[in-house]
Image: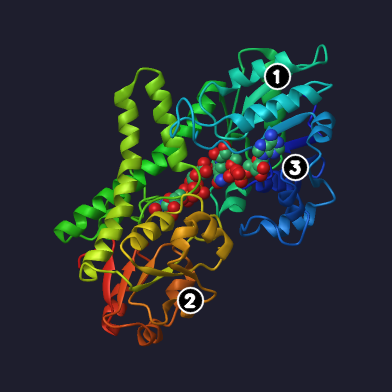
Amino acid sequence: MTRPITTICCIGAGYVGGPTMAMIAKKCPQISVTVVDISQPRIDAWNSSELPIYEPGLDEIVFECRGKNLFFSTDVEGAIRDCEMIFVSVNTPTKKTGLGKGKAADLTYWELAARTIAACSESDKIIVEKSTVPVRTAEAIEKVLQRNCPHDGVRFDILSNPEFLAEGTAIVDLDAPDRVLIGGKIENAKGQAAVDALVGVYSNWVPKENILTANLWSAELSKLAANAFLAQRISSINAMSALCEATGADVQQVSHAIGTDTRIGSKFLNASVGFGGSCFQKDILNLAYICECHGLPEVAEYWHSVVGMNDYQKSRFVKRMISAMFNTISGKKISMLGYAFKKDTGDTRESPAIDVGHGLIEDGAKLNIYDPKVAAAQIALDMGEEAMKSITCCKTHTESLTGAHAVCIMTEWDEFKTYDWEAIYGVMQKPAFVFDGRLILDHQKLKDIGFIVYALGKPL
Ligand code: NAD
Ligand code: UGA
């Protein structure tokens, strides 16, 4: 029988490392969990009352477990030395330079983490790939670990345990996951024992039938495949939204009609201004690159088109705004409501608001941006110095809307639905335009008030 794990270390205290480890600490009081990071400010924030990421339900869990069996530290070496199992949850962005630039995953952080693990490990370790990585990364990492460990006889067992949480619902997703996927070398006894050890951790709260085991390569590829399939659904419904506008069909009626077919299913069929977030685009580009490297250009092209459709949707939205406003937005004030890539998060990585914002500014617009959870400093970082000359970051929605010619909805924050749109009409320039990029407002009501309304995929 495999001995239960009692000490876990996680390298990378980000959107994945923080919440996943907090959940393990909560569900497994017998396990001591230490989350480490090279970023001192990030660790300081995890140890403070203001956590570095906003995620509903996260604060409660961290405050409950922190200092008991959940610790945040920059002592990466010490945490590695003292644990039995190491989750690696570092960032794996798209490569910016060199071979595979703009497509392949940049594994610099991963390799650095692996070298640190090799250098500090004095006893056997189970290494868990939590980051999203190209298929067969475990093979490369195993070589780095085995060839760089100065201590004789230290054994490394590598597992793939991709994370499927979505931001904004991370705690719910971690509490009751559709499935947990664990890949390992199940063909040999030691590999199977490592898989069993990780199954043992999740079994503390996840039903056995929801814990899937697979070979390493299947687990690694399944993560890229899952994100590609999810993004593909959004691009498919967004493609339909363009056709709906051209034909007078209503995309919400179409998605309801097709979603009631149980083979298709109703989730992830919301037309939008485009998908954002740190992972969909990066993972699809990476998947396509892997296909290219394996001599499968047609398969690569198929997945590329999902990203292409997303870019088209964002630029289509900008063009629609400009043409609706009499082909000129130069000097016009546009209120942008929402800037995060989705509701219930302050994360702005790859947010469609960034591309739409740049598109509008290029045509001379002045933007008043309001988001309930995104700080002005983050907007300045994303948009750049030049664009910021045309941007005002607003503290309230009223400040953003007063004197505006148009408002565009970029994020589906619930609070936007409950605003007093009659009062908003009163403080905007006329004609007052609403461009709903998330289909969350009551369009008929807005038209009755006097707004000119453009909603994605809806009859004009
Ligand atoms: P993140 O950028 O929020 O966090 C990564 C952290 O790793 C950073 O704080 C960084 O300082 C730290 N780090 C990097 N190298 C390190 C090293 N050598 N030693 C110690 N710390 C180091 O990234 P994230 O959003 O948490 O994503 C992490 C991985 O999980 C990525 O591969 C991503 O694709 C995947 N993923 C993300 C999500 C999500 O919702 N964000 C969901 C599923 C999977
Ligand atoms: C996504 C996946 O849903 C997670 O399973 C995965 O673990 C994660 O990526 C990852 O690997 O990082 P996330 O990006 O956090 O999670 O959020 P989603 O809910 O998937 O939304 C992504 C984007 O698609 C958002 O901009 C969202 O607004 C958009 N979206 C989503 C739509 O436009 N329409 C939809 O129907 C659903």
Residue hosting label 3: 35
Whether residue 398 is situated above or below residue 144 in the rendered picture: below
Question: In front of the other: label 3 or label 1?
Answer: 1
Earlier sequence position, callout 3 versus callout 1: 3
The image quadrant of residue 113 is: top right
Mark-to-mark CA distance, 2 and 1: 52 Å
Residue at 72% over, 61% down = 50
Crowding around mark 1 (Cα neighbors within 10 Å: few <14, some 14 to 19, many 20+) is many
Residue hosting label 1: 145
Label 1: which secondary element: helix
Quarter of the rendered structure image containing ligand 1: top right
Whether residue 403 is situated above or below residue 440 in the rendered picture: below
| Image disc number at residue 397 | 2
Give percent across and percent down for residue 87. Answer: 69, 34
Residue at 41% over, 27% down = 289
Label 3: which secondary element: strand
